[in-house]
Amino acid sequence: MPQPTYVIDEMISAKSIAARVETLARDITLHFSGTDKLIVVGLLRGSFVFIADLVREIDLPVEVDFLEASSYGDGMESSREVRILKDLRGEIAGRDVLVVEDIVDTGFTLGHVVRLLQSREPKRLEVCALLDKPTRREVDIRATWTGFVIPDEFVVGYGIDFAQRNRNLPFIGKVRFT
């Protein structure tokens, strides 16, 4: 089957992302001030670039862990069936936890992950998302902190992929099929 052809138009520049990450990190640092350790949980795979930049800017002791959940596979639409592909290695009971997500779309994946982690009884659990598409929301879930609100466009870059491609772009780009 031939690969679809597409063009990527820059939507959010690398410079804008870097500036927003600094602001988010300041807000997160203030919110969790006084914690002995913030457990930052990155949702793989799309959040890995964002989480790396974010934790370097957070001025608190942090531990990083990852959880991989999937509801997309290689497609462009959510299957609405969330599967946990990789669970946390550490315990979060009684701890301060920040979930870092690349994009909140329908909300199915994030809603599932938040319920799962809440059942493990963290002291506090908050969410930071790089991107939010509120017009696509089907589940009532919101991030505590959001980098950018975007329209209903298919995007790639800064860790976000299309069929495992374009994660390495330094910006967020809108995919336009040709």
Image (cartoon, rainbow, N blue to C red):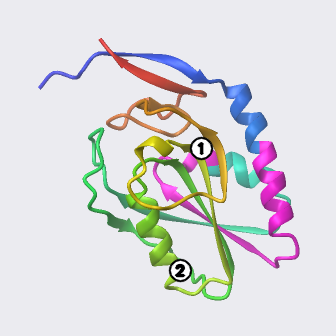
Does 162 lie within the magenta span? no
In the rendered view, does 45 fall on the left or right side of 94?
left
x, y (%) of residue 146?
65, 48
Depth order, front residue of 106/128:
106
Q: Which residue corresponds to the image point at 36% horizontal and 38% vertical from the top-left?
A: 164
- Magenta part of the protein: which range? 22-50
Vertical placement of 117 versus 94: above or below?
Answer: above
Residue 25 relative to residue 82: left or right: right
Rendered location of residue 74, percent (x, y): 27, 42
In the rendered structure, does residue 45 fall within the stretch colored magenta? yes
* Quadrant assignment for the C terminus: top left
**Label 2 Cα crowd, 10 Å radius (few <14 / some 14-19 / many 20+):** some
Categorize mark 1 by other alpha carbons within 10 Å: few (<14), some (14-19), many (20+): some
How far across and down, in percent of the image, does residue 125 sit?
63, 73
Q: Nearer the viewer, residue 169 or 101?
A: 101
Q: Residue at x 46, y 31 (%)?
A: 156
Q: Is residue 132 above or below residue 17?
A: below
For image coordinates 74% across by 35% down, the residue present is 18
Where disc 1 sits, the SS reads helix
Quarter assignment of residue 87: bottom left
Image quarter for residue 22?
top right
Report which residue position mark 2 lands on: 118
Q: Which amino acid type is shown beneath numbered disc 2?
A: Gln
Say the numbered circle drawn on residue 49. 1
